[in-house]
Image: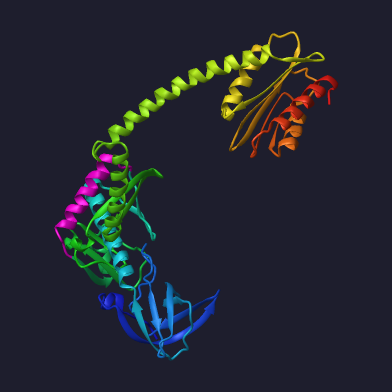
């Protein structure tokens, strides 16, 4: 027995009484077929409706999905009903409205993209958060803006949306934007403004007029596989997005002490100022690193044939340590002796350390880093001439003195 499809015959019906034809269990879900249903199954790019099935004793089952399988409408639920039971099938009207808003909006956008730019819709996807249309030609920003304006003009015009049912032969003779070539038997064709906006074979649910869509927002566009992928939202989704974006822009505008309209210019100005400050900071950091490298070298201790450099900085950044070590290595390139340097930056959030040496140094920096890791509870590693690491604990004086003594002895003896 075929299921009566109320979502086509009576699209405004939100509830009906039906008989359970079958009920099977699969992967923790119950698959139920009914004599009639207002629940639209996933298809044509549109998500399935949601709703409830209520049994004669008031027991309820949530409809988590609905699909067409082997020609039957199958309701996926979280509870079972025996075949022959008389149940109430209740549509989630809010969810249906959302799906219909998105799908009708897709027809408006696809129809106008074809008429304005000759673009062919080659893909449509609807998720709970966003929808996409794939067009076969690349569109630039000015074109997508023109498309959005034209789509919303069609919404404001409150044009008719109607469906005609025919067969494949008749459908193939009609001038349609898009047709389902492999469909056999009954064919549903959706017209917007009698084809002036769109005409397309489609199995989804739609609104009665374009005005019911409310609004259409193209949220993004990307060049995709030689064409264009449009991201869009319609109706309630568009309204919620507008509120969300307005709130975010208002908050940003307040932070920048400007208006929402002037916000891009304010952000650009700040970005330029930040870039100038970064350039200035880079120069000053290089000067400080050069000075600190000179200090390290001047206060180095001779350990055998190795000049040993050791210092603990407070609240320097890890990058500052790298700059100092790089400057030290550059200054020691022409030195006639071996050298080894170990520097720390300690603060409340932890300790960073960097170490480097000349190629002929007896002590491997990889081994030195392992010793520092053990003493500080840190993690790190490197090569024989350079290593780095970090501990989540501040470096106390006793531990620092122990590490320095180890460095001096190790460079003397070549641990």
Residue at position x 46%, y 89% in the image: 83
Q: Is residue 349 left or right of residue 221?
A: right
**Residue 220 visible in the shown view:** yes
Residue at position x 25%, y 72% in the image: 165
Q: How many marks?
A: 0
Residue extending farthest right: 413
Place of residue 130 in the rendered image (x, y in percent of width and height, measured from the top left): 36, 56
Residue 150 within the magenta-colored segment of the rendering? yes
Place of residue 238 in the rendered image (x, y in percent of width and height, measured from the top left): 28, 55
Q: Relative to 149, does residue 366 appear above or below in the rendering?
A: above
**Residue 140 visible in the shown view:** no
In which quadrant of the rendered view does residue 305 lie? top right
The residue lying toward the viewer, choosing from 382 and 321, is 321
Report the quarter where the N terminus lies.
bottom left
The residue lying toward the viewer, choosing from 132 and 317, is 317
In which quadrant of the rendered view does residue 184 lie? bottom left
Report the quarter where the C terminus lies.
top right
Q: Is residue 175 left or right of residue 276?
A: left
Q: Is residue 23 left or right of residue 138?
A: right
Residue 299 within the magenta-colored segment of the rendering? no
The residue lying toward the viewer, choosing from 120 and 182, is 120
In which quadrant of the rendered view does residue 163 lie? bottom left
Place of residue 388 in the rendered image (x, y in percent of width and height, measured from the top left): 67, 30
Q: Which residues are magenta?
A: 138-160
Our reading of the magenta stretch's main secondary structure is helix
Q: How is the image coloured?
A: rainbow
Residue at position x 42%, y 24% in the image: 277
């Amino acid at each position: 027995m075929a299921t009566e499809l109320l979502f086509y015959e009576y699209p405004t019906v939100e509830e009906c009484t039906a008989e359970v034809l079958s009920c099977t269990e699969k992967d923790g879900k119950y698959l139920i077929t009914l004599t009639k249903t207002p629940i639209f199954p996933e298809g044509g790019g549109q998500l399935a409706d949601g709703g409830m099935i209520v049994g004669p004793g008031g027991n309820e089952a949530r409809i988590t999905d609905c699909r067409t399988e082997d020609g039957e409408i199958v309701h996926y639920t979280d509870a079972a009903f025996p075949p022959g039971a008389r149940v109430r099938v209740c549509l989630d009207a809010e969810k249906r409205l959302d799906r219909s808003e998105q799908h009708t909006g897709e027809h408006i956008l696809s129809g106008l993209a074809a008429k304005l730019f000759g673009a062919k819709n080659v893909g449509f996807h609807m998720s709970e958060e966003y929808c996409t249309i794939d067009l076969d030609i690349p569109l630039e920003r000015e074109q997508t803006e023109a498309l959005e304006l034209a789509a919303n003009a069609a919404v404001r015009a409150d044009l008719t949306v109607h469906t005609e049912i025919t067969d494949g032969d008749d459908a193939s003779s009609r001038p349609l934007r898009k047709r389902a070539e492999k469909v056999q038997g009954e064919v549903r064709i959706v017209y917007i403004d009698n084809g002036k906006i769109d005409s397309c074979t489609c199995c989804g649910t739609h609104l009665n007029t374009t005005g019911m869509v409310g609004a259409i927002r193209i949220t993004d566009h990307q060049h995709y596989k030689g064409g264009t992928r449009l991201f869009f939202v319609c109706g309630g989704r568009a309204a919620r997005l507008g509120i969300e974006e307005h709130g975010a822009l208002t908050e940003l505008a307040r932070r920048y002490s400007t208006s929402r309209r002037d916000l891009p210019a304010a952000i650009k100005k700040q970005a330029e100022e930040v870039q100038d400050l970064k350039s200035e900071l880079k120069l000053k950091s290089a000067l400080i690193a050069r000075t600190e490298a000179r200090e390290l070298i001047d206060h180095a201790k001779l350990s055998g044939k190795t000049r040993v450099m050791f210092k603990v900085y407070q609240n320097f950044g890890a990058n500052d340590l790298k700059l100092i070590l790089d400057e030290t290595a550059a200054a020691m390139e022409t030195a006639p002796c071996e050298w080894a340097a170990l520097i720390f930056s300690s603060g409340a959030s932890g300790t960073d350390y960097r170490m480097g040496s000349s190629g002929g140094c007896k002590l491997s920096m990889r081994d030195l880093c392992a010793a520092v890791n053990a003493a500080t509870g840190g993690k790190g590693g490197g090569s024989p001439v350079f290593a780095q690491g970090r501990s989540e604990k501040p470096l106390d004086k006793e531990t620092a003195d122990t590490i320095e003594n180890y460095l001096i002895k190790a460079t003397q003896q070549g641990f």
